[in-house]
Amino acid sequence: MFIKEAFAQAANSAAQTTEPTLMSFLPMIGIIVIFYFLLIRPQTKRAKEQKQMQNELQKGDEIVISGGELGRVVSAGDSYITMEIATGVEIIVLKSSVQTLLPKGTLKSIETGKSNRALKNSKQKSNEPRQTEPENKETEVNETESPKQDNEKN
């Protein structure tokens, strides 16, 4: 008796379900549109600007590469650039590793953490002769030995 009623209810609820409509997909479509305008579009725009900047590099540009090194472009090829990181020190890096193009004159104005006084002191210290180590190291060792070691020797 109860079993027949249960089957009847199951068949009745299956008939009530309808096909998915546009209204059920509307929230999903809204989320995709929001993701496009807030995430995907700005990211592709930034990647396009980065690629354009890397392709337009020329001699004399001041740049920062992905490793954090700052330098000046000495020469630029199709895939690689030669970058001067210090006077007389040049390295070859991929164009794709260039992260930022700095305004002209930035490298001269950057503070390296050392003041002029510290630089002068380091130059003066480097000009002074080095102190030599004591010639007779055995006497120093014997003076630092403990009395127990002296007793063992006797």
Image: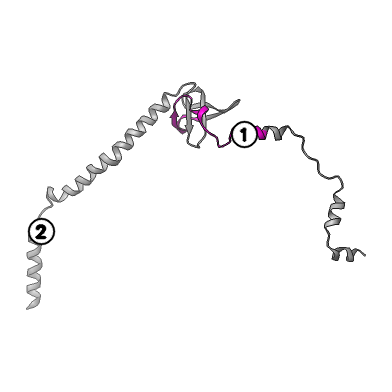
- Foreground residue among 59 and 33: 59
Residue 68 is situated, as x and y percent measured from the top left of the image, at: 50, 36
Q: How many marks?
A: 2
What is the quadrant of residue 147 in the picture?
bottom right
- Foreground residue among 4 and 131: 131
The residue pinned by badge 1 equals: 117
Residue 71 is situated, as x and y percent measured from the top left of the image, at: 52, 29
* Above or below, 71 relative to 11: above
Between tags 2 and 1, which lies in front?
1
Q: Residue furthest bottom?
A: 1
Mark identifier at residue 17: 2
| Quarter of the image that includes the N terminus | bottom left
Q: Is residue 28 magenta?
A: no
Point 16% across, 47% down: residue: 26
Return the disc, 2 or 1, that comes first in the chain's sequence: 2
Q: For the residue marked with disc 1, what is the amino acid?
A: Arg
Q: For the residue marked with disc 2, what is the amino acid?
A: Thr
